[in-house]
Amino acid sequence: MSSLHDVSRRVLVTGASGYVGGRLVRSLIAEGLTVKVMVRDPRKISELNWLKEVEVAQGNAMSEGDLERALTGVHTAFYLLHSINAGTNFNEVEEEMAKKFANAAERAGVKQIVYLGGIANDEKMSKHLSSRAKTGEVLASGSVPVLEMRAGIIIGSGSASFEMLRHLTHRLPIMTTPKWVSNRTHPIAIRDVLWYLSHAATLKEPVSGIFDIGGAEVLSYEEMMQKFAKISGLRRRIIIKVPVLTPNLSSLWIGFVTPVPTSLARPLVGSLINEVVADPKKSIDNYIPKPPQGLIDVNGAIELALSRISSNEVETRWSDATVPTAPWQKAQGDPEWAGESTYYDRRIATTDAPIEKVWESIEEIGGDRGWYGADFLWYLRGLIDRIFGGVGLRRGRRDPKTLRVGESLDFWRVETIERNGVERKLRLYAEMILPGKAWLEFRIREVKIADSIQTEITQEASFAPRGLGGQIYWLIVLPFHAFVFPTMLRNIVRSSKRKVLFG
């Protein structure tokens, strides 16, 4: 077994704003390593608790120049990039990204690449697993040694697989499922995944090879659901297996029942048609020993994940990765389309509630709290978005009290938060399917009216239409705005006053 040494070496984490990457950074810092992260938008990590302890390299993973600058001086580079949401050609995008990364790592003198893929031991693999395997193959085609770890279902608070499991089990006491729910899987707790990844950065010598990492037990997806039901205090679920539910039909159903959108559910469900079990011949034990306390079993992993959720300690979520928008939409930072107008719905109210209480009410918006009235219309808009392949309203929020830049909030993405200063602001960017770009912004400030200090709330919805379709869309939704937005502002004021009275 190789000994571990030299924890001072420099490592790079790509995908640091994602589910695994965001947690891995903290684990690497705990190992005493010098950590560098590469992100496309530094705002997405601006409020993470490890930010001041890392070096940040801003760049695009499709730019070899950006990659080489980020990789220069790095000993071990973690490749945690994927394009599972990039549409039907995600496999081509992933292959191109991997090739650019391998080339840049070679030129930068990187000694070790660590890649997290998916267990792929069946002869017939899903498109998703095939793409994951191909990514590892492309990375290994360069001269830099690649240690490829392949995991199955990752169980942890905030993971897409766990959210599918949790919501299907909670919401459906009786369910019809495809036959593949009886296929064997080898789930692993996120804590154990982080153990293996973080220790890969401290190996004495670079390692090349493919290694399967699995948890303490092998079981079917059906057995996992029954375990989840028992731990959650639910009755045993009645599961009826039928042969007609294809992965595509199953992903559509999951898109309606769980927070995971159909676009993400499709490749995940497609992977379940395979038996995803670690091969003992591909064990990593000769290089990285199992955790001292042993691998966590499925019961322990589920209990740990649920405890994190109930105590509002979810560190990262699957939805932290930005969801690609429709083809006619552009990123938040792009300039407005030439010749187009931006439409506004601006409303202002004042209250004698202190600015701190008003801000608390605004920052608690969405998720289980709802949107301060007319929630049935918000639900309907989310349902329409789901029907057209969007993310819908079920993503909820990571924490019921606080938000951070870059995270998802129902079908919005938090673009700006300014909690201090004379004016406080929350700006949300719409990730629903739209013929244009939309934002919802709240600004609050203290104003003097007569002899008293009041809090002024400005609530502003803005929409940059894309062509005639966008302009027609704005006209169609205007009547709904006339009901939804005044109600929202009025109830924010009421909520703020209740906080003054009841805390």
Image (tube, rainbow, N blue to C red):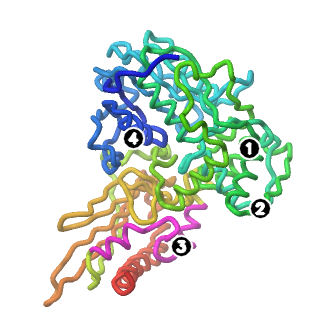
Q: Image height check: is 4 above or below 387?
A: above
Q: Quadrant of residue 175?
A: bottom right
Tell me which segment is drawn in magenta: 356-383
Mark carried by residue 173? 2
Say which label, 4 or 2, has the lower sequence index.
4
Q: Quadrant of residue 350?
A: bottom left
* Residue with the mark numbered 3: 375
Q: Nearer the viewer, mark 3 or mark 4?
A: 4
Q: Position of residue 308 (x, y in %)?
A: 52, 55
Q: Nearer the viewer, mark 4 or mark 1?
A: 4
Q: Position of residue 458 (x, y in %)?
A: 29, 72
Q: Residue furthest top?
A: 143
* Residue with the mark numbered 1: 221
Q: Position of residue 382 (x, y in %)?
A: 56, 61
- C-alpha distance separating marks 4 and 1: 30 Å
Characterize the local packing of mark 1: few (<14), some (14-19) or many (20 or more) Cα atoms within 10 angstroms.
many
* Residue with the mark numbered 4: 26
Q: Position of residue 499 (x, y in %)?
A: 37, 81
- C-alpha distance separating marks 2 and 1: 16 Å
